[in-house]
Amino acid sequence: LLEKLNKIKPVWVELGLQTKFDETAKFIRRGFELSEYESAVKKLKSIGITVITHMIIGLPFETKEMIVETARYIGKSGVDGIKFHLLHILEDTDLAEIYRKGIFKTLELDEYVDILKECVEVIPPDMVIHRLTGDGWKKKLISPLWSGDKKKVLNTINKYFELNNVEQGSKFFD
């Protein structure tokens, strides 16, 4: 069906990978193995479908190196685009209960921007970045509260990228 529709009007499919690490995927209850993501990408690309992958920056227990490795993995997976998201802790979720116990912390704005920089540098220069951050529902947002000021977040990203000469794909081949 997707292949047929794609001949009439462009179709793209967005896949919520979030992380390449199985232990994190189990913790957040992603519900599928990495091999299933790889299979889906391969099948979709084989019928000419544009594929966009979502990843979350700041998942519990992931290091900066793990997060950048997920971005590098997505960059090499053959997908066409990426959407970067910041982890948000929202009221009435299991994650909120765990967060309140102090088991993990959310990222500060400067940490997020620094990690985002590293992620942008390891994806292919021609991959479309559809999103640099996302917003949690302000009414339910517990943390990070700085993410509620989208204009400030985007301005901070732009300024940091400009000051540090961030170039998409500059470390893709490393």
Image: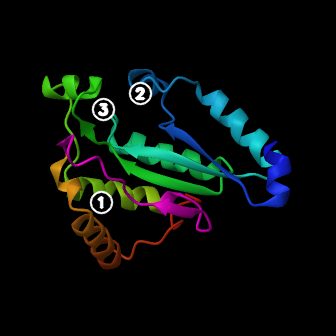
Residue at 40% x, 72% y is 166
In the rendered image, residue 111, in percent from the top left (x then y), is placed at 24, 53
- SS class, disc 2: helix
Mark 3: few/some/many CA within 10 Å (<14, 14-19, 20+): some
Q: Is residue 136 magenta?
A: yes
Can I make out residue 163 in this image? yes
Name the side, left or right, on which 1 lies relative to 104: right
- Prevalent SS, magenta region: loop
The answer to which image quadrant residue 165 occupies is bottom left
Q: Earlier in the sequence, mark 2 or mark 3?
A: 2
Task: Indicate the amino acid at tag 3.
Answer: Pro
Q: Which residues are magenta?
A: 121-143
Residue 121 located left or right of residue 76: left
Secondary-structure class at tag 1: helix
Structural distance between the alpha carbons of marks 2 and 1: 21 Å
State the mark number for residue 65: none
Residue 6 x %, y %? 80, 55
> Residue 60 got which mark?
3
Please give left or right for residue 163 compared with residue 36 in the image. left
Give the percent coordinates (x, y) of residue 108. 19, 51
Looking at the image, which residue is at 32% across and 52% down?
A: 135
Image quadrant holding the C terminus, namely bottom right
Sequence-wise, the earlier of marks 3 and 1 is 3
Residue under label 2, please give it.
24
Asked whether residue 47 is in view, the answer is: no
In percent of the image, x 28 and y 54: which residue is there?
A: 112
Say which quadrant the N terminus sits in.
top right
In which quadrant of the rendered view does residue 81 lie? bottom right
Q: Work out whether residue 6 or residue 18 is closer to the camera in this orientation and state it.
A: 6
Crowd class of label 1 (few under 14; some 14 to 19; many from 20; radius 10 Å) = many
Which residue bears the numbered disc 1?
A: 113
What type is the residue that disc 2 sits on? Thr
